[in-house]
Image (tube, rainbow, N blue to C red):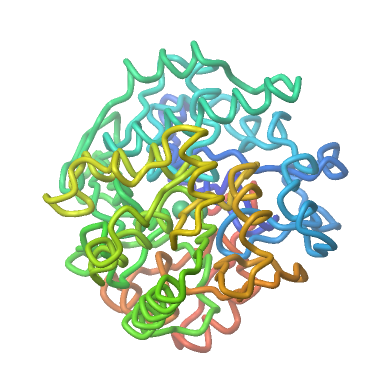
Amino acid sequence: MLVEYKPIGGAVIPPSGASSHALIVHDPQSHEKCAVLIDFGLEPRPLKAAKGKYYSSTPPSEKPQVKNFGYGLHVRKLPSLEDFLGIGDKVVYASEECLPACKLLEGIRVLCVVATHAHFDHIGGIPWFHVKFPDTKIVMTEPTLEMGERLWMAYTRSLQLRNIRPLYHESDIECLQDKAWLVRAGESIDIGPFSLKFLEANHVLGALCVFVTINTPRGSGIKIFFSGDMSLAKQRTVPPSTILQEEADYAVIETTLASRQEVSSEKVETRLLRDVEGCLGRGGKFIFARRSIGPAQEIFAILKQGGILERWPKCVFFDGATRSVAEVYARHSAFGEEIKDVSPYLVSTEEQRKEIISSSRPAVVIAPADQRSEILLRYLSAWSRSSRNVVDVAARGVRFRAKTTTYVLRAHLSLQDLEAIVGRLDPKKVFLVHGDTDESKKIERFLGRTVTRTVLGKSYYL
Ligand SMILES: [Zn+2]
Ligand SMILES: [Zn+2]
């Protein structure tokens, strides 16, 4: 039996940043091949690059003019506020080239796809895959499905509004809702020659890491660890990861932010709470522009923990896509048992939004920085012109009169986390994926061992 690992796509920065992977088993007797996929993401491509072959097995010579700064996609040059927020017009999600390369899977029976978590670069292509291959099992947690539905619907609607044909439609999403195979962290499933064990990834609500064991006819199988996106940092809205109790023969590990300097989360939270308190105290407005799934909810949990919700009643609000995600978080008790209902914290009507924007009352608004953020633009246009206000947004080159700041909340592996995981799992081989793995030399020096910087579409035999 031959086992092959192949990164198939979903890269932020090609060719090494895969977020979607295939694990393929070749049976030498029957010549059959079967596989499990870990994630099936959708990555935006700038209009200019949409005709390029970013998912071919040969790496592109030119990098796209977009860069991921941790949330959302930003053009490198940001001449104006409108350009920053109008990024949706410069990016397409509608071409099949934005999907992982299915031609790399020709002749292979895909038994299941695991959706590790609800970020679009991991699940964006799942409804498309389900339409194309309806017999393949789609495995995920309940929160991932609930947030996924909202994201997939928002994707189809936003493209339809712009007269662009999406890769899948509402009926495809509804069909997936009924057929998804729901699992929880701590559970295991068997499918064909694969045993899959799921553990908490400590990334966003419902996120999983996956251990895949391949059961060989002779017994003791090889075990491969897929980190998905994960962290070992303390987070307020998700349970800690328990992967440090495991071992594995091979490890496929994300390096999204591994090159960044480690920061103390206590220090960041203390500064954040002090800034918010100070801003509200002088009658100001505070805008958090954050990724809708994860960071937006974590900010809310920090504000709750720091007593802001009590000291400043009716002052903290979710708006835009962060609202429905907050509802899912609350339903799954991610804000604690006392906030099972977030409706008092949601901007639910246009009148209310206008009221909040024009009122002289202090306020904190958590709005989405990702995709097309008309909502964010509304708050920024109104509030970024006063020096009394504060804007938390990673917009390089955009000048506001309001104070700009940002708080690094870690939901990805740091170099130290990577060291802890590799030390504990003790794998024969470490494959680096996702993010800019140009940092592999730095990681090798830090870990004191060789790692494999993966290439999209390439086969690695285990
Ligand atoms: Zn993620
Ligand atoms: Zn990711």
Residue 461 appears in the figure: no
Up the image or down, 342 lies above or below 444; here it is: above
At a point 74% along the width and 25% down the height, the residue shown is 162
Where residue 197 sits: x, y (%)?
Answer: 23, 46
Foreground pick, 106 / 340:
340
| 169 relative to 314 in the view: left or right | right
Where residue 258 sits: x, y (%)?
Answer: 50, 74
Foreground pick, 205 / 15:
205
At a point 30% along the width and 67% down the height, the residue shown is 302
On the image, which quarter does residue 168 sit in?
Answer: top right
At a point 60% along the width and 27% down the height, the residue shown is 106
Up the image or down, 32 lies above or below 42; here it is: above
Total marks shown come to 0
Where residue 153 sits: x, y (%)?
Answer: 51, 25
Up the image or down, 70 lies above or below 376; here it is: below
Residue 186 appears in the figure: yes
Which residue is farthest front? 360
Where residue 295 sits: x, y (%)?
Answer: 42, 58
At a point 18% along the width and 47% down the height, the residue shown is 333
Foreground pick, 292 / 123:
292
Foreground pick, 286 / 208:
286
Quadrant (top left, top right, bottom left, bottom right) of the N terminus: top left
Quadrant (top left, top right, bottom left, bottom right) of the C terminus: bottom left
On the image, which quarter does residue 29 sit in?
Answer: top left
